[in-house]
Image: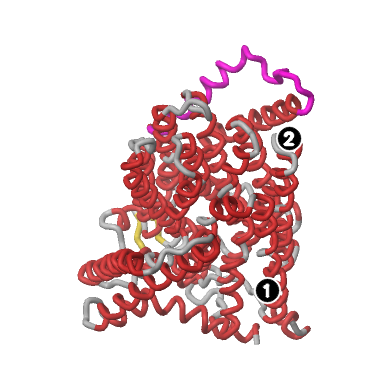
């Protein structure tokens, strides 16, 4: 990277904030909104991955089938296909009432609750009904991926670029807290209701998933309490009252919860290390603490009702691609046609492709299977547009223009960025698919897993997220990316050490702490990186493309992690996940040398100001990079 380029790019960047200004930024109401939306986004993912894996294993399902259930989350990797519809289409009634982003948020959150309820209604011990659980898991993956699309776009539009690293780190923290609830919380509840390694109870897991569905209502509460950043508010007093009530409720829930959680964590670690059973919180105080939180949780439905009734009237100003109801219907029909074609092509090609043995060959075969089916679906979509199902200009503006915008800004160097996006998280995502099964195979109980992985580990990932936010503010983004990538792959070697000390809690805690610290840091830095690449004109579409690429290859490969372990063993598997992370370091170095990652346009300015503050255009961004 030349000195001239660095000087030009540095002139466009805002001055670094002082420590006091950075701390004060965390008191912004938007920080609390993103914390709770992150929590809502973090709930579904483990209900598809690790918690579901343990449920299926306790029900006697084979390990190879269990890990293949992770493919239900491939919706996260293909969400770029329907993300344009979220930018293009309004939701009947909800868009006019709540706004473009919050209307879609409500739809996705209701679908998540419905999908979790359906999963809870299926007992996987009866193998002939596994297909229904798989269908419910796919619905959960689709709806939670849709929620992610909307929340990511909402976050980028909610605040100017200077706040994005803060909102990213807080979002990651909320996401990890949601994972604690859906991970450790689910395991604790399943144990409490009577299901364990030696005695499987469907009722225990059913009740656990019912509770997880109820917890998701916190996401609905946050959506109705927040506001639409790209809309004009006509009744600001109502909006301000909703925010004040929401922030008060959040404080009453979070501050005591944080204090109790820290005390509980210290108590648990002390007892584990000293082999004692002392209680820092007197048993006499526990009923009062439980009553306090039960009252707060009981107030949530009443608050939700209040926020629904007290919604302020708005005027939506964000433009929609579709101009008429006819365009809406035609775009939906085009999407449905492409999806049906994809499913038909996948089934047909599956019957034609030969069956192969070996995890690696199966991975290649399945990757080609998916890509070929996707190509057929894209061809069908092109054909439907060509015959006039959708106007060409509408289809171009919906699916093609966001992609062209990215390549206009970065030219051929965009391919380097796409490669980095697609491979950056491969090391820890592939290793994470089989993590819970690995801990069980190492002789740890479900309670051990909950304490170490789902509680201590996730807390460390939250701390790592805050570190990532600091790194993204104090250093160049590519330097922070290099640190995150190096730590993410190197910490996988700690699990090789654990294979030589099965059942050792100290070794387990060491591996979990460092692995989750690295994952949290890498996640926060990566989100800030993706936000910097996203144009404010195409927030939902471009960010969905980036985040889909991030998970597509790792999740397809992760589906074969069980087969790799069966054939090669755990030590080889974790060395393999370390090795596939090493080329990423070289890729980061090349990107850093060839491309300057600039700031986003200011969403508030671009959408509301009229010439008072000039924003950089795609051509301006490109001039900084060449």
Say left or right for 13 vs 358: right
Closer to us: 469 or 575: 575
Badges 2 and 1: C-beta atoms under 8 Å apart? no
Closer to us: 537 or 350: 350
Say left or right for 383 vs 234: left
Q: Nearer the viewer, mark 2 or mark 1?
A: 2
Residue tagged by mark 1? 587
Q: Residue at x 43, y 71 (%)?
A: 371
Magenta span: predominant SS is: helix
Q: Residue at x 57, y 21 (%)?
A: 289
Helix, strand, or loop for circle 2?
A: loop
Q: Which numbered marker is on residue 179?
A: none
Q: What's the CA distance linking mark 2 and mark 1? A: 37 Å
Residue 311 seen from this side: no
Q: What count of labels does the image hold?
A: 2
Q: Is residue 282 magenta?
A: yes
Quarter of the C terminus within the rendering: bottom right
Residue tagged by mark 2? 504
What is the magenta range? 273-301
- Count neighbours of disc 2 (C-alpha within 10 A) and say few if under 14, some if 14 to 19, many if 20 or more: some
Q: Residue at x 63, y 37 (%)?
A: 455
Q: Position of residue 625 (x, y in %)?
A: 65, 83
Q: Position of residue 73 (x, y in %)?
A: 45, 54
Q: Position of residue 182 (x, y in %)?
A: 51, 39
Closer to us: 54 or 8: 54
């Amino acid at each position: 990277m030349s000195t001239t380029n660095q000087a030009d790019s540095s002139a466009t960047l805002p001055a670094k904030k002082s420590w006091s200004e950075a701390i004060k930024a965390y008191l912004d109401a938007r920080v609390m909104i993103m914390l709770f939306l992150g929590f809502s986004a973090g709930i579904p993912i483990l209900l598809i991955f690790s918690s579901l894996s343990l449920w299926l294993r306790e029900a006697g399902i084979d390990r190879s089938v269990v890990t293949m259930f992770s493919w239900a989350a491939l919706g996260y990797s293909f969400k770029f296909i329907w993300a344009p519809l979220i930018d293009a289409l309004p939701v009947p009634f909800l868009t006019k009432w709540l706004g473009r982003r919050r209307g879609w948020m409500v739809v996705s959150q209701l679908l998540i609750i419905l999908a979790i309820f359906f999963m809870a209604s299926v007992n996987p011990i009866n193998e002939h009904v596994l297909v229904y659980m798989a269908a419910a898991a796919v619905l959960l993956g689709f709806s939670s991926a849709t929620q992610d699309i909307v929340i990511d776009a909402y976050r980028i539009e909610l605040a100017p670029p200077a706040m994005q690293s803060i909102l990213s780190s807080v979002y990651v923290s909320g996401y990890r807290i949601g994972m604690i609830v859906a991970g450790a919380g689910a395991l604790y509840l399943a144990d409490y209701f009577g299901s364990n390694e030696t005695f499987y109870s469907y009722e225990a897991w059913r009740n656990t998933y019912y509770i997880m569905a109820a917890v998701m209502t916190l996401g609905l509460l946050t959506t109705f309490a927040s506001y639409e950043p790209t809309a004009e508010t006509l009744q600001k007093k109502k909006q301000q009252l909703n925010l004040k009530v929401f922030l008060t409720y959040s404080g009453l829930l979070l501050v005591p919860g944080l204090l109790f959680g820290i005390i509980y964590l210290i108590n648990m670690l002390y007892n584990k290390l000293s082999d004692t059973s002392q209680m820092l919180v007197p048993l006499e105080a526990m009923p009062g603490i439980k009553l306090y939180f039960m009252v707060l949780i009981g107030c949530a439905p009443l608050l939700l009702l209040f926020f629904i009734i007290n919604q302020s009237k708005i005027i939506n100003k964000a433009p929609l691609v579709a101009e008429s109801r006819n365009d809406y219907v035609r775009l939906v029909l085009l999407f449905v046609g492409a999806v049906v074609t994809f499913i038909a092509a996948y089934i047909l090609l599956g019957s034609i492709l030969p069956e192969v043995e070996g995890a690696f060959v199966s991975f290649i075969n399945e990757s080609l299977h998916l890509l070929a089916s996707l190509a057929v679906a894209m061809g069908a979509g092109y054909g439907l547009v060509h015959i006039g199902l959708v106007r060409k200009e509408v289809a171009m503006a919906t699916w093609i223009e966001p992609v062209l915008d990215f390549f206009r800004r970065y030219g051929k160097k965009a391919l380097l960025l796409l490669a980095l996006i697609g491979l950056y998280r491969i090391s820890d995502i592939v290793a994470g698919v089989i993590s819970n099964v690995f801990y069980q195979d190492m002789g740890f109980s479900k309670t051990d897993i909950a304490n170490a992985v789902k509680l201590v580990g996730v807390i460390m990932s939250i701390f790592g997220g805050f570190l990532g936010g600091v790194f993204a503010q104090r250093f160049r983004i590519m330097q922070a990316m290099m640190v995150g990538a190096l730590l993410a792959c190197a910490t996988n070697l700690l699990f090789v050490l654990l294979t030589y000390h099965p059942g050792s809690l100290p070794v387990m805690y060491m591996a979990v702490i460092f692995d989750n610290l690295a994952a949290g840091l890498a996640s926060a830095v990566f989100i800030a990186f993706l936000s910097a690449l996203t144009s404010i004109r195409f927030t939902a579409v471009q960010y969905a493309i980036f985040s889909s690429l991030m998970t597509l290859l790792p999740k397809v490969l992760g589906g074969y992690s069980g087969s790799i372990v069966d054939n090669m063993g755990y030590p080889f598997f974790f060395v393999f996940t370390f090795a596939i992370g090493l080329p990423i370091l070289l890729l980061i170095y090349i990107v850093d040398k060839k491309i300057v990652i600039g700031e986003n346009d200011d969403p508030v300015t671009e959408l509301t100001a009229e010439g008072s503050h000039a924003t950089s255009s795609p051509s301006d961004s490109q001039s900084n990079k060449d």
